[in-house]
Image (cartoon, rainbow, N blue to C red):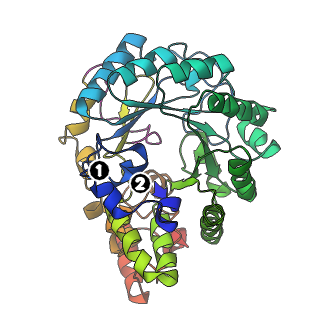
Amino acid sequence: MIGISKLYCGTVEPSDALRYGRKSKAMPSHLLQFSKDKKPVVVWNMGRRCNLRCAHCYSASKDIDYSGELSTKEGKALIDDLAQFGAPVILFSGGEPLMRPDLVELAEHATSQGMRAVISTNGTLITPEKARELKEVGLSYVGVSLDGVGETNDRFRGVKGAFDMALQGIKNCQEQGIKVGLRFTINKRNYQDIPGIFELLETENIPRVCFYHLVYAGRGSKLVEEDLTHEETRQVVDQIIDLTADLHQRGLPKEVLTVDNHADGVYLYLRVLQEDPERARNVMSLLEMNEGNSSGRGIGCVSWDGAVHADQFWRHTSFGNVRERPFSEIWTDLSNPLMEKLKSKVPHLKGRCALCKWKNICGGNFRVRAEAVTGDLWAADPACYLTDAEIGLNETDDADIAAADGTSLSCFE
């Protein structure tokens, strides 16, 4: 997670994170990415069922009943363990979490244990009554997924009218005083709508947006050809930076983040270095605190059936099940070779990632994408759009890259 507004517009300084000792439990949510202990934010996919049919859904959800989901009692036991372990946030997700009738009860249990409870939703089921219930139990934040404006969103999400229903859900949250933000997954079908998303932030007084880079998992694994090219990605990241700065300069600051491609942090730093070298030092300090990709360390996932994953996209690999052992034990058990390596990814990287001079602030980017494309989870992330020159490579490194990865360089071009 890269805070575009934090880094580029200077809404956060290194001293802000240091003030809290960089401890997850003490830090406000907007600073959690800079914590030192990296206690995990845990995504609980509490149910798989969903009322939409999104093209990129990592859980490949349908509007059908699924068996084997954790019960309310099991969910509360999970929350108790996470609270005692020191996980600062539980994110209720799905499928569509609002299709579980006990969502409000479980969110209230989390807040009663001192955790911050947030939900990731398509927004279409947030009625005025549901928004009031969520407010009453102390929900911290509602992230609503909109993958375009109007018909763009509806086509991508597979249900006509989904955009209007989601927008009404956002308004229902706002009327109850619940902080609400947008989630947008960038791909060839919708990147032209990014300016419209910024207009929506302004017209609807929405304080936050997260732009997600496409991850090749679930139904998203069929969209590899619909991911942006490296040049298109560079243009989009520049556009997001420019639009964020425009709002900031007009006295309408919004929290803008990009997610699932830590090359964004380096790209932004290199831009700031050209524009304001003094400011660039602060940007680098914050990126060093961030440490890049945090799958298996600062973010974790519990599936609907209790399986524990490194993140919500890594469903094909489980480290254990909370029905058999508490999450806290599974998460700290380094006898699993993959879990041990995920706690410190950099020494295991291959190819371009291994030779990149920014690997300690990128953390090797997104391992699931590397595995999906190359079959090797430690290979270079094919979605890294930084040039060889930008990452400190030259022509003499080509043979080393190919030998390290065992793959053709063409898959990174």
Q: Is residue 186 magenta?
A: no
> At 48% across and 81% down in the image, what residue appears?
276
What's the CA distance linking mark 1 and mark 2? 10 Å
Query: Image quadrant for the C terminus?
Result: bottom right
Query: Is the residue marked by circle 2 packed among few (<14), some (14-19), or many (20+) residues within 10 Å?
Result: many
> At 70% across and 56% down in the image, what residue appears?
194
Residue designated by label 2: 367
**Residue 171 placement: quadrant:** top right
Going by the numbered disc 2, the residue's amino acid type is Arg
Find the residue positioned furthest to the left. Answer: 335
Q: Is residue 36 above or below residue 180?
A: below
Q: Tell which of 148 and 23 is nearer to you.
A: 23
Identify the secondary structure beneath mark 2.
helix
Whether residue 252 sits left or right of residue 283 in the image: it is: right
Going by the numbered disc 1, the residue's amino acid type is Leu
The earlier-in-sequence mark between 1 and 2 is 1
Please provide the residue range marked out in magenta: 311-324
**Residue 19 placement: quadrant:** bottom left
Identify the secondary structure beneath mark 1.
helix
Q: Is residue 318 magenta?
A: yes
Q: Is residue 351 visible?
A: no
Pointers 1 and 2 in contact (CB under 8 A)? Answer: yes
Q: Is residue 253 above or below residue 233?
A: above
Q: Is residue 197 visible?
A: yes
Residue designated by label 1: 342
> At 30% across and 46% down in the image, what residue appears?
297
**Residue 88 placement: quadrant:** top left
Q: Tell which of 86 and 189 is nearer to you.
A: 86
Where does the image place residue 250, in percent across and percent down from the top left? 66, 63
Q: Main secondary structure of the magenta part?
A: loop
Where does the image place residue 333, in percent across and percent down from the top left? 19, 37
Query: Is the residue marked by circle 1 packed among few (<14), some (14-19), or many (20+) residues within 10 Å?
Result: some
